[in-house]
Image (cartoon, rainbow, N blue to C red):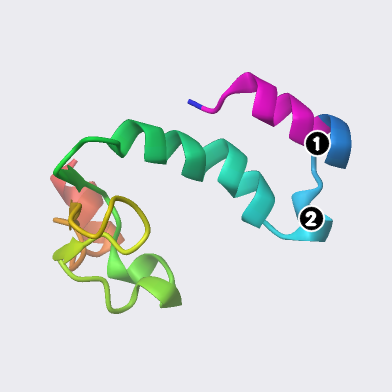
Amino acid sequence: MPYHESTEKLVKEKVLFSFYNDGHNECCSVRKIAPLKRALDGLDAWITGQRKNQSPSRSNLPVIQIDPAFGDGELVKFNPLANWTLKQVWQYI
């Protein structure tokens, strides 16, 4: 969960929908990246629901990887749905 102080500061300084003009980096950093870093701190591994077909940038997503964005270079990231299609996800559900 984001710290409300950081979110409030961003909204006061940049307005609520500033990401339309500024891109998503600052907004995502406050609302997603910082909270996830806190949640993963001290863990050895984590599991995601990411899939290769969700976006072009995920097309080479491995099932198991060392997380390049979080941790200290030793955090293992499991992407068990990496090779699933959306149809397969809904069939499983």
Relative depth, front residue between 35 and 59 = 35
Q: Position of residue 30 (x, y in %)?
A: 60, 39
How far separated are the C-alphas under marks 2 and 1? 10 Å
The residue beneath circle 2 is 20
**48 w.r.t. 85: above or below:** above
Asked if residue 15 lies left or right of residue 46, the reply is: right
Which residues are the magenta region?
A: 2-11
**67 w.r.t. 12: above or below:** below
Relative depth, front residue between 20 and 9 = 9
Marks 2 and 1 close (CB-CB < 8 Å): no
x 18%, y 56%: residue? 74
Q: Position of residue 28 (x, y in %)?
A: 59, 47
Quadrant position of residue 88: bottom left
In the rendered image, residue 4 lying in the magenta stretch gets the answer yes
Q: Residues within 10 Å of mark 1 (few under 14, many from 20)?
A: few
x 54%, y 28%: residue? 2
The residue beneath circle 1 is 16
Q: Position of residue 58 (x, y in %)?
A: 36, 71
Task: From the image, give the main secondary structure of the stretch colored magenta.
Answer: helix
Q: Where is residue 12 in the image (x, y as percent from the top left)?
A: 85, 30
Disc 1 marks a residue whose amino acid type is Leu
| Outermost residue, front side | 72
Quadrant position of residue 77: bottom left
**20 w.r.t. 83: above or below:** above
Q: Residues within 10 Å of mark 2 (few under 14, many from 20)?
A: few
